[in-house]
Amino acid sequence: MKTCLVVDDSSVIRKIARRILEEMNFHIIEAEDGEKALEICKRELPEAILLDWNMPVMDGYEFLRSLRQLPDGDRPKVVFCTTENGMDHIARALDAGANEYIMKPFDKDIVAAKFQEVGLIQLAEPV
Amino acid sequence: MTPPDYEYLRKLLRDHSGLDLSADKQYLIESRLLPLSRKAGLSGISELVQKMKGGSASIVTQVVEAMTTNETFFFRDKTPFDHFRASIMPEILAARAGRKSIRIWCAAGSTGQEPYSLAMCLKEMGATLAGWRTEIIATDLSQEVLEKSKAGIYSQFEVQRGLPIQMLVKYFKQTGEFWQINADIRAMVQHRQLNLLHDFSQLGTFDVIFCRNVLIYFDQDTKINIFNRLARITEADGFLVLGAAETVVGLTDVFRPYPERRGLYRPNSSRASPSNMPATGAGPKVAAMSGR
């Protein structure tokens, strides 16, 4: 079972994301800001990270830059999930090493499509 | 919805669009037509039916369009586009190296996500296609969805299903809450209104035809008729791409499955003779067929 770290300061978003990702067979770890997420990643890197942008202490962008500098820090697939929906933010996220980008609001189909896009899951073919 | 209203709508849809609803699709009609009746200020489907019986052509058009509009999104189902990049294009590039020309038809282009996905695939091939003439024709029964396709403007929700973020950044411009596909990609797609049940030979011949998730709504005779006519305008070494739930197998031998490429078909070298095919528009069922 793959592990996904859900990083968001909103407990409601973390709960929604957990429900969606557990249905997709992920083991979920939660962090409420970038600093706590970085501590977790220093101990053990997850396969996937669903990442908010605006958070107290350390935001998602700073977290991502720090993550990519860790040993094997380029390994986790990072999918931003944020209300920062402007092209400039998306471009900055990609430059910093984000693999995909979800613009809130989101639903299960969007998460599944993005996770498939970066190779974290394989969606069944329609029949 | 009363049984007589349902039967009236079934017949009307069959006659106007070829849509072949089974006896248990009341929920589908209600889910599509209740919003339409509310928008028209009517109390419900019964009043909608009364308006149609009273001869309102505008309501009939709106009902047909509401019932035949299908869900679509960029790179829908992914696999057909993998086939396009990995199997179709390499063969076409080799076969057309002399004339350097490719013609593609999206037979149910809907709001543009499929033709624009193909246009982006071609654009991604960059220098490989330098000097080539590429044509993508997108057709649909509904003028309303064609207008949306031409504009190329999509909601945040629409650009997040199937479209890789790198492609959004590369090929779209943000306009407020919406995203518009760039003019150079829009210019690669020509739009035409077309009813699949009418003669489409005037479109010319194609190297690739995408006809996905539209034939599933038609009865068997209609499917066979369309397959036969598609075969006549597919180049002998061309390709037909169907939806995952669609097949020619058991219906006709004018196309044969491409080995190990689900949804991909090629014309049979021994094609059905035109004399075996019903003339377009001949017979009540054929005359009733339509596109999406």
Image: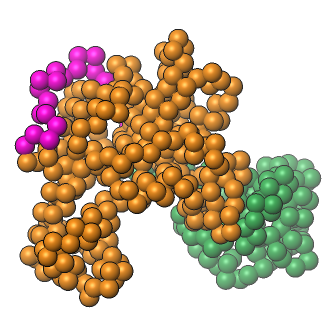
Q: Main secondary structure of the magenta part?
A: loop
Of B9 and B249, nearer the camera is B9
Residue A88: in magenta span:
no
- Residue B48, how many percent across, how many down? 22, 78
Tell whether position B278 is magenta: yes
Q: Is B234 positioned to the left or the right of B114 in the image?
A: left
Rendered shade, chain A: green
The residue that appears at 14% across and 46% down in the rendered structure is B287
Q: Nearer the viewer, residue A116 or A70?
A: A116
Q: How is the image coloured?
A: by chain
Q: Name the image quarter holding residue B145.
A: bottom left
Q: In which quarter of the image is the N terminus of chain A?
A: bottom right
Residue A5 visible, this angle: no
- Does B202 sit above or below residue A33? above
Magenta region, residue range: B255-283
Q: Can you tell which quarter of the image residue A90 is in?
A: bottom right
Residue at 69%, 76% in the rendered image: A14
Q: What residue is drawn where x is 28% and y is 32%?
A: B201
B8 lies left or right of B166:
left
Left or right: A56 with respect to B264?
A: right
Query: Which residue: 31% across, 32% down?
Result: B202
Q: How many labels does the image show?
A: 0
Write down the quadrant of residue A48 in the picture. bottom right
Residue B232 screen position, x and y as percent: 27, 26
Chain letter of the orange region: B
Name above or below for residue A56 compared with residue B135: below
Residue placed farthest to the top in the image?
B98
Q: Position of residue B75 (x, y in %)?
A: 53, 47
Is residue B188 shown to the viewer in this render? yes
Compared to residue B166, the image places residue B225 above or below, namely above
Percent x, y for residue B216?
Answer: 27, 50
